[in-house]
Amino acid sequence: MKKLCLLFTVFLSFLVVKADEGMWLLKELNRQSVARMQELGFTFPIDKLYDENNASLKDAVVIFGGGCSGVAVSKQGLIFTNHHCGYGAIQKLSSVEHDYLKNGFKADRFQDELPADGLTVSFLSSMRDVTDEILSKIPSVLSEIQRELAIDSISETLTQEFENSPFKSARIVPFYSGNKYYMVVYDVFRDVRLVVTPPESVGKFGGETDNWMWPRHTGDFSVFRVYADQNNQPAEFDPANVPYKPRYVVPVSLNGYQKGSYSMTIGYPGRTQRYMSSWGIQQMVESENKPRIEVRGVKQEIWWNDMTKSDETRIKYASKYDGSSNYWKNAIGMNEAIDHLNVIAEKKELENRLASWIESDPARKEKYGNTLNTLEEAYTNSNEIAKYTTYFLETFQNGIEIIRFSNTILQFNTNGTEQEKQEFINDRILRAYKDYDPQLDKKVLPALMKLYAERVPKEYQPDVYETINKKFKGNYEKYAEWLFKNSKFTNLDDLLTLLKSADTKRLTKDPAMQLALSVKDMGYELSSRMMSDYEKILRGEREFMAALMEMNPDKAFSPDANFTQRLSYGSIKGYAPRDAVWYDYFSTAKGVMEKYKPGDPEFDLKPFVIEALNKGDFGQYADKDGNMRTCFLSDNDITGGNSGSPVFNGQAELIGLAFDGNWESLSGDILFEPEMQRTISVDIRYVLFIIDKVMNAPHIVQELTIVQ
């Protein structure tokens, strides 16, 4: 049932590839792409990009945590990634007494490095095409749902040898809307330690105001180290572990770049929807992005108000707020870009061309004659239920935290052994409550439940709304007061006592659990209402992709992002966002001081940062004109998940870390616009300057292989 959990997502389709568009599998680089890379300035040996038998560049680019990328830069396991990628780990390690978010951190010795509990770094081991092993076993008579279930079953068989290994991870990944499959295997390292992080006034400089914007002056980096056992193999945390020796280490260039210089990213882009139909895009705009913007806007305003008043609350909610607001602003920018760039009209043109191609041949009409109509019908019929589903998910799954805690408690085995119970409490309960403020959640609950009632018809409101209307006369604040006063889940000590009592009846009768159960029932209802259209979309998108590939047999297709290792190539360049405006391709430390606002939560700077910047002792990190470049632009094709991806020059030397895209092209996940779409990266020289001169950690720079 794994794939069926994607019910509430928007589904993939296809778009004709444009010049330099594409997040390419290193293992499948075609001659056309290689020739273009070399034309742009790539001189690194192609056979050293990906090699499963010998050390190659692919061995240095990692999955950092669960949704970012990173790069190995030293023979002692140093990993460079973004500050916002390490933010959750840094937040967990922080406290009011040791506020690493606000003040930064650096370890002078290995033994001073801080273990990041729960953080993993994964190195790609292998990729194997298993398409024939899967599709040859799928009868054509199966419905789409049955087909997905059969694929899940075969996939579990193919990966079962890795199931019980904590240090190996294997998954079967679909490509081209389920027309091709790879088994991807990773080595998972579980002893990861924080080495250096700048203060967030550097790592998050500009905050939400500058997020997705250019010019940018953010030192978005952090440094971690991977540890292994004495045999250089993955291991759980142990003080006796030693720094891991990666198969391949990336050299770091201080030579910089110029306009037009070759630029290449390798990383783990999470999800694109370049092949989505016009009807799917319309649903995304109206039924996903708009409700998400509204609900998160309400929640974030409540969170931010309390975060600015209390350091304790700020630390608890820093990572949660950061994650929520990032996609909130992304949704705003995406809707604007889709409208401004006429994305839907361009998709309709593609669909019209495909329709003409299908109609021109009886055999194609027999095979694909219903494909476009199926997609249009399925998306159109599901628009309303998709909108209500987004309100549901954003309110009850991503919004009110006590519901998520209750769902976790539902998994508690009251009949388990004492050891099993304690492990559950330690791993699932204590970690969650460390970053939870019941009084803040009590403010969020009535605001979001009221908004949900105003936007969603009664037939899609959980049964708890009847109780609120009858017992509390529709007053959501009074309901929240009652729930948080009477629930044992809002006080950690009370909850632990209740869990240890193993009283199932008291657990299920708790007001918070009653709310969660009511919500869960409605979740099933929404899912069942969507199922019929979901199945049509599954079939329609698969046929749509197959038709487009058949219509363009000589075209090299770049598969949609699916959090597998990808390469994108391009050049360093600026862009014109609107009439009479031109953005240069790099920013400098001068802009940091121009934006600096004392006391502002987004643009303040620590005194020692100001001192270092004003001193201007940039040394070997300055460009040829003596400037300290902070960030730069390139036309690489990236998306979420690429955060922390290394940016390479033509010799595969590190020149930066990708961390953002530009506002004007936030429709890039569904339509690549080469004249407008830009990747924003932090200059590696600024990273090293901060490490060396600001954080006073020159020993870290000495670990690197520096190219000058």
Image (cartoon, rainbow, N blue to C red):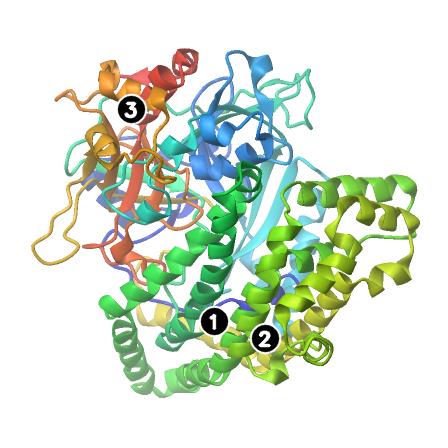
Q: Earlier in the sequence, mark 3 or mark 2?
A: 2
Where, quadrant-wise, is the N terminus in this rendering?
bottom right
In the drawing, what numbered circle is on residue 542?
1
| Residue that carries the numbered disc 2 in the rendered image | 144
Alpha-carbon span between mark 3 and mark 1: 45 Å
Query: Residue 71: percent from the left, percent from the top?
Result: 44, 31
- Farthest left residue in view: 580
Q: Nearer the viewer, mark 3 or mark 2?
A: 3
Q: Determine the secondary structure under disc 2.
A: helix
**Residue nearer the viewer, 217 or 209:** 209
Q: Determine the secondary structure under disc 1.
A: helix
Alpha-carbon span between mark 1 and mark 2: 10 Å
Q: Amino acid at mark 2?
A: Glu
Circle 3 residues within 10 Å: few <14, some 14–19, many ≥20:
many
Q: Amino acid at mark 3?
A: Arg
Q: Residue at x 25, y 72 (%)?
A: 346
| Residue that carries the numbered disc 3 in the rendered image | 685
**Residue nearer the viewer, 322 or 546:** 322
Q: Earlier in the sequence, mark 3 or mark 1?
A: 1
Q: Is residue 620 above or below residue 365?
A: above
Q: Are marks 1 and 2 in contact (CB under 8 Å)?
A: yes
Alpha-carbon span between mark 3 and mark 2: 51 Å
Q: Is residue 445 above or below residue 188?
A: below
Q: Amino acid at mark 1?
A: Arg
Where, quadrant-wise, is the C terminus in this rendering?
top left
Q: Earlier in the sequence, mark 1 or mark 2?
A: 2
Q: Residue at x 25, y 37 (%)?
A: 595
Q: Nearer the viewer, mark 3 or mark 1?
A: 3
Image quadrant in which you'd find residue 236 = top right
In the drawing, what numbered circle is on residue 348?
none
Side of 308 where 66 appears, left or right: right
